[in-house]
Image (tube, grey):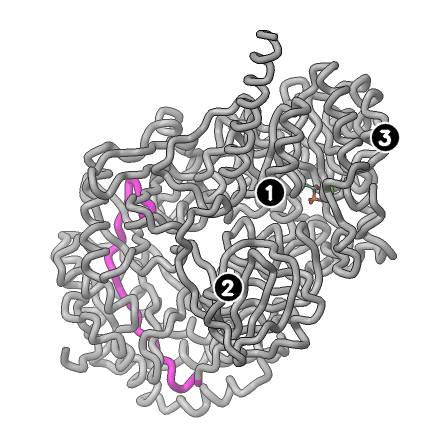
Amino acid sequence: MENNSVVWLEEVGKEDIGIVGGKGASLGEMIQAELPVPPGYAVTAQAYRRFLDENGFADKLFRTLDIDVNDADALNGAEKKAKKIILDGKIPPDIEQGIRSKYAELCKKEGHEVNVAIRSSATAEDLPDASFAGQQDTFLNVKGEDDVIDAVKKCWASLYGARAIYYRVNQGFDHRKVDLCAVVQMMVDAEKAGVMFSSHPSTGDGVTIIEGAWGLGEAVVSGVVSPDYYVIDKGTKKIKERRIAIKNVMHTKDPKTGKTVNLPVPNDMKNATVLEDDEMLRLVDFAEILEELYGIPQDIEWAIMKGEVYILQSRPITTIKKKTELIENNLTSSSSLLLQGLGASPGSVSGKAKIVSDATELGKVKNGDILVAVMTTPDMVPAMKRAAAIVTDEGGMTCHAAIVSRELGCAAVVGTKQATSVLSDGMMISVDGEKGLVYEGKLDVVEKKAIKAEMPVSFARPMQITATEVKVNVSVPEATARAVQTRADGVGLLRIEHMILGLPKHPKQYIKEGKKDEYVSELVSRIQTVVDAFYPKPVWVRTLDAPTDEFRAMEGGESEPVEPNPMLGFRGIRRDLIDTEHFELEVMAFKELIKRGYNNIGIMVPLVQHPSELRRAREFMREKGLDIDKIDIGIMVEIPAAALIIDQFIAEGLDFVSFGTNDLTQYTLAVDRNNEHVSHLYNEMHPAVMKLIEHVIVECNKAGVKTSICGQAGSYPKVVKRLVELGITSISANIDAVETVREMVARTELQLMLKAARERKD
Ligand code: PEP
Ligand code: MG
């Protein structure tokens, strides 16, 4: 392609990444392959460069960026100054004319003034295909030549947003060598839209997965709405699974203002299928073409308007995880064992170590790196998603890093005591998340021959039906899709504190700023992601159980009390019964979800030690207007006291109990669950722990109260076997353990039936 300033997308292809960036080049490739991509044009990186040169402000601009990016004030100051320089600049007249005339041509072709989206497609001189995804801004529904010119400038200016400046410095990019192409593309007023994976995103199995909802795809991509979920066999084109979600909201264009708005879905469409069979098959055809075009499985954004399918974006799937193990016989002297810890989440990978001491350093962690930290915190979750593995100094099998990496499906070794001092930034290491080992150097990773039980569920295998329900635990909404794929009988534990800890500020800060409603709606949307995805299966939502030390790290969390031992402190229901202002907001969130029709919610009260706590919690919820008679309410059995006087809890009245063995073990054995120095004494199968559990199951069975387990021990086959023999009602396991647990439950039930049959015969 000629080195022009403003070019039609169909004029560019993969060889033009240096001119139009990765996104622009991919759109061009797809148009050339005659895929239905909305028409548009690119204001190239060269146009942007000329804009800088002809205004003569490049030096001044880059000097403003010469700051310490860890100094938040300096960073914000640099953003302001740099953006002003760009916005005050004058676009060279021929480029401005090019932008205007191509927009006019688009309108002419469509027969009316069109709405366009203006998206950034950055490019780096030395590394043209570097990914700057999500660092710059997108402008939707822009209309009219003047507004388009304005939005192109704003798009260029977004290259100097604080986040983008910070990211480039941390990734080692020279600001002077990064340019920005602005893609101007016709908006698709989608009636329905979503995403699809041309192959299974975690196993690579021979299926295409489509997710779709009403309106613009943004709602699906951002997770605001739970989409319908369809699985189609790539070979036979048979629809293997079709899960229709309740779709309450849709993003759509307001016909009056032309702006994107969030509207309730009309009642008759809420439970209706988004895609008809023929639409699904058309989408699958496109997925096949795109996988063929790029040679690797694709993650595709699609939309349907007036019956026509549009492809909005396609990029490689990066999450396919093969069942792997390290080849131990290629251990050499240069790949010696560096660290030993607990194998907290299976998987074997090699990658560069990136030591992260707090959230400001998260930009260091690129796709495929190994995140190393003293302990992970909830604000690290975005970087944990990019990481191939996690290694920590502290923690046991139930610490934050262990729980979240199991949910995200990435390998983890925790409690190594010294990872942050032994490892250094950029060092190549290999991690065995099953055995808890970290080696120096890059070991070969091979696909496992045998299918190990902890690996993701295969859609090809028929599911065993068990009398004892097998449920799944969820802590971060990002794990919902993986959790649903287990086909569990519901969620036996939804930890809301992980959702709260993932918010930008402490709940008290929302309250202080008079933004209670905003906080409640954040809670509602996060919980809804899960209750919606599992509807109508039950989801037991646990009220807040966050230790003060974790909450203190949040913005506005300074007032959290400093406690000598947070594990024995201000957490669980004891906290909510004192901080009733927060408890009330939780209740408001539950009420809103019930109002939205989610009758599958149960409420679980954590860390109770006396029946009066359950009584007060129930009274409070009733006082605040929650119709608790229509909701299952239960307790976590985590404190030995609760187990020992379970009869008194039963007399108080409750629908279920669930064993929180992570805490029950630490409190029974006096072993801090997060303390790697005593982790050798931490044993969920200790006879004292098992005796407490047995007592509770026997008493509850007599009274007809349901029993369950949601601690980590519920993922251990040996414990599961014993619990089924004792007559537990359900087991709630980690995502990666659901299938093994289901097998163990089924086998134990068969053995019990066989035994009973034999005894009858005798
Ligand atoms: C438990 O204690 O077993 C439990 C499931 O709760 P958490 O791990 O969140 O304390
Ligand atoms: Mg607990």
Q: Which residue is mark 1?
A: 523
The reply to whether dot 3 and dot 1 touch (C-beta < 8 Å) is no
Point out residue 131 in the picture as x, y percentages from the top left corner: 38, 70
- Report the front residue among 515 and 563: 563
Number of numbered discs: 3
State the CA–CA distance, disc 2 to disc 3. 42 Å
Respond yes or no on whether mark 1 lies under 8 Å from ligand 1. no
Please tell me whether residue 100 is drawn above or below residue 520 in the rendered image: below
Which residue shows up at 80% across the image and 52% down it?
A: 672
Q: Secondary structure at mark 3?
A: loop
Q: Which residue is mark 2?
A: 387
Please tell me whether residue 743 is drawn above or below residue 29 in the rendered image: above
Amino acid at pointer 3: His
Which residue shows up at 34% across the image and 68% down it?
A: 120
State the CA–CA distance, disc 1 to disc 2. 26 Å
Horizontally, residue 470 falls left or right of residue 226, namely right
Point out residue 34 in the picture as x, y percentages from the top left corner: 12, 57
Say which label, 3 or 1, has the lower sequence index. Answer: 1
Q: Is residue 549 magenta?
A: no
Quarter assignment of residue 305: top left
Q: Which residue is mark 3?
A: 610
Say which label, 2 or 3, has the lower sequence index. Answer: 2
State the CA–CA distance, disc 3 to disc 1. 28 Å
Crowdedness of circle 3 by 10 Å Cα count: few (<14), some, many (20+)? Answer: some
How would you classify the magenta stretch by its main secondary structure?
Answer: strand
Magenta segment: 174-196
